[in-house]
Amino acid sequence: MPRYKNSRILTNASKYYAPLRKSRNMRAIRHYETPVLYNPDAIDRFNTTTEAHIWSYGDRFYKLADQYYGDVRFWWVIAWYNGTPTEADINNGDLIEIPLNIQEALRVLGA
């Protein structure tokens, strides 16, 4: 399940995008509505089964998502759950938590 599955698709005909629409010969541009995700609080974290992972050289969110969920598209769940938007925000030796049940993690994050 991609993160935009439940997002509305908006049609944008604002003047701001006029040069882009003109260059692409389009009347309007379609955007996905920005999803509103929830930062898990202490109770949500306590009730979510996770596995601790020590970040090491070569780790990537997409690799961990493939390993734990069988789908690289869920890399963002691990990143969001840990409050680290990119791998550059994590150092070798840092401890991160990986939610084990993807459906539960999506519910906790509001996705």
Image (cartoon, helix red, strand yellow):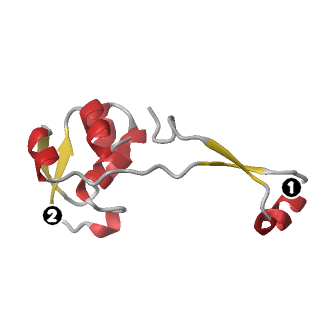
In the image, 12 versus 101, the foreground residue is: 12
Q: Residue at x 8, y 45 (%)?
A: 46
Q: Residue 88's spot in the image, x, y percent?
A: 33, 68
- The tag on residue 5 is none
Q: Residue at x 12, y 53 (%)?
A: 42
Callout 1 secondary element: loop
Seen as rendered, the residue at the extreme left is 46
Quarter-wise, where is residue 44 in the image? top left
Q: CA distance from mark 1 to mark 2?
A: 45 Å
Callout 2 secondary element: loop
Quadrant placement of the N terminus: top left
Q: Residue 76's spot in the image, x, y percent?
A: 37, 49
Q: Residues within 10 Å of mark 1 (few under 14, many from 20)?
A: few
- Residue under numbered circle 2: 94
Is the C-beta separation of discs 1 and 2 under 8 Å? no
- Reply above or below: 72 against 38: above
Could you tell me if residue 58 is visible in this image?
A: yes
36 relative position to 67: left or right: right
In the image, 89 versus 107, the foreground residue is: 107
Q: Residue at x 32, y 38 (%)?
A: 106
- Residue under numbered circle 1: 24
Quadrant placement of the C terminus: top left
